[in-house]
Structures are given as structure tokens and as C-alpha cells.
Image (spheres, rainbow, N blue to C red):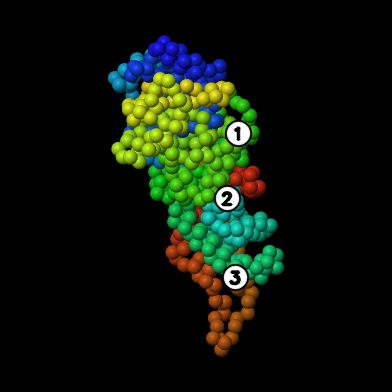
Amino acid sequence: MKEKFAEDIAQSYTFKGDSIFLGCGFYDHQVDPKARVFLPLKMFNRHGLIAGATGTGKTKTLQVIAEQLSKKGVSSLLLDIKGDLSGIGAEGVDNPKIQERHQILAEPWNAKLNTVEFLTISDQPGTRLRATVSEFGPVLLSKILGLNDTQQGVVALIFKYCDDRAFPLLDLEDLKKVLQYISNEGKEEIIKEFGSVSSTSVGTILRKIIELEQQGAAIFFGERSFEVEDLVRTDREGNGMISILRAVDIQDKPKFFSTFMLQILAEIYSKFPEAGDLDKPKLVLFLDEAHLLFEEATPALMDQMTTIIKLIRSKGIGVIFITQNPIDIPAEVLSQLGLKIQHALRAFTAKDRKAIKQAAENYPETEYYDVSQIITELGIGEALVTALSEKGTPTALVHAMLRAPESRMDILTDSEIQNLIRKSEIADYYNETINRESAEEILSKKLEELRESMPDEPESRGRSAHPEKSTVEKVLGSTTARSLGNTVVREVTRGLMGMLGIKTRATTRKKTTWF
């Protein structure tokens, strides 16, 4: 029976194309080095799932796959929610436990120094990711703000108005200024061209923007915008770039988080050409704590997310979700995932046992294991694995001991991170803030010219020489709202670009290679 097991696993996980070594299968509580488990590069664009309870080894599995993909020239983007992925940027340190594990696997272990880029959408050090409001687009912006059809129409009107007059919408201050204008001084102009706009709708949109600002979106809107093509680079040895997005301080901002990730996926989808069947993916995204992506997403955002995940694989892009339980992922997304790596789940309550039973149903049946039982017995660094073969059929389910990462299995110090950032070829470029004239400045000048051209009113009428400000203008001019707006001024999401017909940015740069 043991010989049959080794033969079945070896046959199921042997592929014609290039692949990466993940580990070896267990049979009767012992590792069989003949039952070697590989993952085919060709199928990484069919997406995947790494699941398991806290402390079972999910992060190390992510680390292993990312660094092995890098060796094959495949770039990746790692979303670091917990702050424990930075170690992939340093060479691993040998120890007896690593040597013992790899002797069992009959696979040599060598420390590896990866090529790493640290990215940020907050105040943390790193290369900044930013996008303009115009790049975000009226459709995606409306969905993120949770607007109804009437309010979406107002947002579309604003984009059309600004496009026709070459008023750049770079940050949320620009958007709020246009809202103020169309509800006050520019009201007659808007009515003549587009019809009347409800002040109630304008007020609602304004409140939604302030809510988004409070979620931390401020740092993301603005220039310079990040080019997603810079995620796909290789070093002199041909190793793929591992980009780590440091996002420790956005896990309590679910709307901003889901918005940002949808934008990244939409931007990649719109910018990358159709690729067909490739021998290896162009880019693999690892989304840690994936449940945060779906918890606060509106139905519209969820539909958009599902659609993009279904379509993005044709661009040579893979997405791997990392979460505690497969049921954290919506069924319509889970059905798209070809690779599944299941670490241990713990059964402390009746609800836990029910969740484990549901999780077990996501995996192929096997004569070698009782899946619902073994899920609770997996050790650290062990997992149930199933993938897609090159023919698109599921491989045999195997309980595997996984290889150890070749990079550091601990976090980097602040000084080590700063040193890597200083070596970056793109950090200086993207960290420069561009504040060119945009809608806010243009409309402010226009309003000032109007006020200066108006004749003074007689004081006997009891009115000031300047017209009374509207309620919206007062709100926008208040210290509190202004402070919130300035926070949102430069960074949060770029979106659907080609899909939504958004114009490309005016600011471009000459591309440079990594070295």
C-alpha cells in the first residue's frame, strides 16, 4: 500500500513544464521522500488558497512559494497585514530543525537572499502607492462610496464637466471643490448644460467622501501615480521581484482596504495585455488576511471583485488568498481557486466542528486520509495539498510536510528595512509629491475673479460686499473638514482605467530597469 501511495502521488504531481518543489507526502504518519509534491508554474494563474488556524504555518508557506517563484523569474506582490513578512528580504539562518526537516524530505536547503521592494499606502517607510481621482474613475468611485443611481449620476457629471474643461481631478480636495462649485456659483452653468442637480445628493456625496477620508484614504489620492508595471521586474540573476506592501495600519479600515485591493486588481487587469496560456505567470498576488477584503465590501464591490478575479488570469496574473478558514472566502470566489493548501484547523466548539466539516468538503476525496479528522491533527509546517495539473484536473489530495523558507523566518529591524528602501531604484521617484494645478486651484481662481468683478452692495441693505457662503461651502471651508481633506489629498486607489474608459495620467516618466 505504501508503494502504491508513493506511486500515485509522484504520478499526480509530476508535470511536463517547470514547477516548484513544495514538500513530500505522509503515509501512515511517516514522510515518504518518494512522494514528492510539486506545483506547476503554468497553473499559478488559476489562483489559490492557503488556509489554517493561527500559528499553523500559513505565513511560512506563503514565504516558501513566493521565494521559489522568484527563483523561476516570477514576480510577486505580498500584502503584509500582520507585519511578519519582512524577513523574506534577508538571507535565512541555518539551524538544526531546518536541517532535520530537509533530511527527511531528501532536499538540500540553502540560504537565499531575495530581491525585495517595500511598498506603502500609509505613513510607514517604503515606496508610496498613489493614484489620482481621475484614474480611479466615476464608476468605481461611486461603488466605493456606496452611492445610489442618482448620486452616481452626479459623480459622472462632475467627471464629464472636468474632462471637458481640462480640470484635473487629482485628489479629494479637487472633488469637494467641484461639488461646492456646482451647488453654488456654478449652479446656473450646470443647469444650462446638464440640468438641475439636487443639493441633497451633493451633501450626501460630500459626507461619503469625508467618511472615506476618515478611513485613511487621504494618503493615497494624488501624484505621482504608481505604475503597476513596476511590480514585474527581475534582477541581474533573473530572479523575480518580491514586492511587500506594508499594510499593518489599515486592517481596522475595511472599506479603504477592500477599495484599495479592488483598485490594484482593476489596474493590473486594465494595464496588462491578454497573455493566453503562458509557461509561467507574469505576477502572483498574495493577499494575507483575505477575509478583510470581503467583510465590509458592498454588494457592488463584491460583484466587481468576483468578475475581475475570473478574468485576470487571462492576463497571466495569479491571486492567492491567505485566511484562517476556506469559508471566509465567498463561494463564487472559492470556486475559482485551483490551488488549495490547508493547514490545521482547531475544533474547540460545535461551531468549529461544523466549520471543519464544511472545509473538508472543499477537497477531493481520497482513500488515504479521513480529511475531516486529519485537518485537526496536522502539525506546524504540514498541510493538505491539492492543485491543478497542466490539463486542468485536480491532483490527488496529499498530506505533506512542507519545505522550509530559505529566507529569514523572522521580521527585519527598522534599520534593515530602511537600508533596503535606500537601495530601491524607484522609491525616490514615487515618493516625490507632485502638486500641479488642478480643479481646486482653477476653480478657486475663477471664483476669486468673479468676486472681484462684482460691484459692492450698499451697506443700507444690510448685506456684506461679498455674497453669503452656501452651507456646503461653509462645511468645506471649516477647519475640521479642511484637515480631513488634506489627509486624503494624496493616495488610495487607481481603478478600472481601460475597463471604465478613464484617461491616462498627464505625468509620465522614462522607465528604468531595476539595475
Secondary structure of residue under mark 1:
helix
Mark 1 is on which residue type?
A: Lys
When the figure is inspected, residue 278 is found, relative to residue 510, above or below; the finding is above
Q: Which mark is residue 184?
A: 3
Q: Which mark is residue 140?
A: 2
In front of the other: 259 or 32? 32
Rate crowding at label 1 as few (under 14), some (14 to 19) or many (20 or more) other CA atoms within 10 Å. many
- CA distance for labels 1 and 2: 21 Å
- CA distance for labels 2 and 3: 26 Å
Q: Position of residue 342 (x, y in %)?
A: 41, 30
Mark 2 is on which residue type?
A: Leu
Are the residues tagged 2 and 3 within 8 Å (C-beta)? no
Q: Earlier in the sequence, mark 2 or mark 3?
A: 2
Mark 3 is on which residue type?
A: Asn
Q: Position of residue 187 (x, y in %)?
A: 63, 69
Please give the residue where the numbered disc 1 appears in the rendered image: 315
Which mark's residue is nearer the viewer, 2 or 3?
A: 2
Residue located at (49% from left, 32% from top): 48
